[in-house]
Amino acid sequence: MKGKARKKAGLPPGTLIYAGNKTEKEKARITLFSFNEEIFEEKECADVEECFQFFEKKNNVNWLNIDGLHETEVVEKIGKMLNIHPLTQEDILNTEQRPKIEEYAEYIYIVLKMIYPDGSGDDLLSEQVSILLGANYVVTFQEVKGDIFAPVKERLRTGKGRVRTMSADYLAYLLMDALVDNYFIILEKFGEEIEGIEEVLLKNPQTETLHRIHNLKWDLLSMRKSLWPLREEINNLIKTESSLVKQSTFLYLRDLYDHTIRAVEIIETLRDLISGMLEIYLSSISNRMNEVMKVLTLIATIFMPLTLVVGIYGMNFEFMPELHIRWAYPAVLFLMLGVGVGMVFYFKKRKWL
């Protein structure tokens, strides 16, 4: 990413350079979905220009999905075809954008952040998703191939729901809704993991547990940074006066806005639980250390009088009458044993042991 940033330094605005760090060697996958109430067509294009002919069908809604941003010429061709501003094209390729919404005369540009677990499942990865909403089209750009929009694609293929009867803005809403739903899936997994960590903390806290708590804390912070501006973004769509967003879609956007608020509230709750877990960890470690010190102190206390007896009879005085008594040695041993056992019973009676 740093190398890409240095490449962009000093270049004029609108220069198209991919500034992400998820470059795949294979070609970008270009998929088109063209549909209306009667027809549906899905096509995987070898070149983006193959899909342009479908955009001439004004009665159809066209969804063009691009997986892979390393081929900047694909973005450039789409920009020329749909009259996309050069700064918008630059933002699509600069994957460090903050979630936002920008309104233009012919389209609305939406930036989202998609969160998903890595291969190990221990960490979260973030990917930028860009959406262009036009009068009869939606264009989505993803950094890598993924199935985050698989439920929407399946609904289009099967004709379930009202998606084929609605306009492009409703399709854009469904894509945003799929992304927000993915946040809930991750948050549910986090909630289950936090419950398991709490049980470990109460029984046997380990250093690995502390590391996982810190990782969860940062993952939740990353999700909050993505969701908080998304909430404002959806609110701006609700308030927009653009003709690209129909009045009938506002109801769905308000419902999506409520979902983002609920997701943010869940994140805040989990963050409070994580903070409490850190306190539980420190308390558990402190209690365990106190128990160890308590046992060591009791052992040392028991052996103190025994050490005194041993010290007395370890002195090399010539005139020690006990040295000439036949049963002196076992008597002293029994005395030491009695003192030790007596102190143990005394500690148990006081509930120190």
Image (cartoon, rainbow, N blue to C red):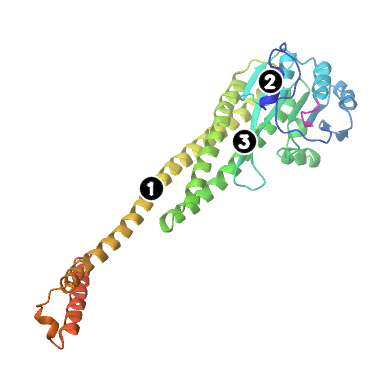
Task: Give, as a three-letter code, the residue at label 3.
Answer: Val
Task: Give, as a three-letter code, the residue at label 2.
Answer: Arg
Earlier residue among tags 3 and 2: 2
- Give the left or right position of residue 38, taking residue 197 as reference: right
Residue 30 is at least partly visible in this image: no
Residue under the image location 12 percent in, 77 percent down: 318
Q: Disc 1 marks which residue?
A: 282
The residue lying toward the viewer, choosing from 253 and 196, is: 196
Q: Tell me if label 3 and label 1 are in contact, CB under 8 Å.
A: no
Magenta residues (range) = 66-71
Task: Give, as a three-letter code, the residue at label 1.
Answer: Leu
Mark 1 element type: helix
Q: Marks 1 and 2, Cα distance to the nearest angstrom?
A: 44 Å
Q: Disc 2 marks which residue?
A: 6
Mark 3 closeness class: few <14, some 14–19, many ≥20 residues within 10 Å:
many
Residue 70 highlighted magenta (yes or no): yes
Quadrant for the N terminus in the image? top right
Query: Magenta span: helix, strand or loop, mainly?
Result: loop
**In the image, which disc is placed on residue 180?**
3
Earlier residue among tags 1 and 2: 2
The residue lying toward the viewer, choosing from 90 and 205, is: 205
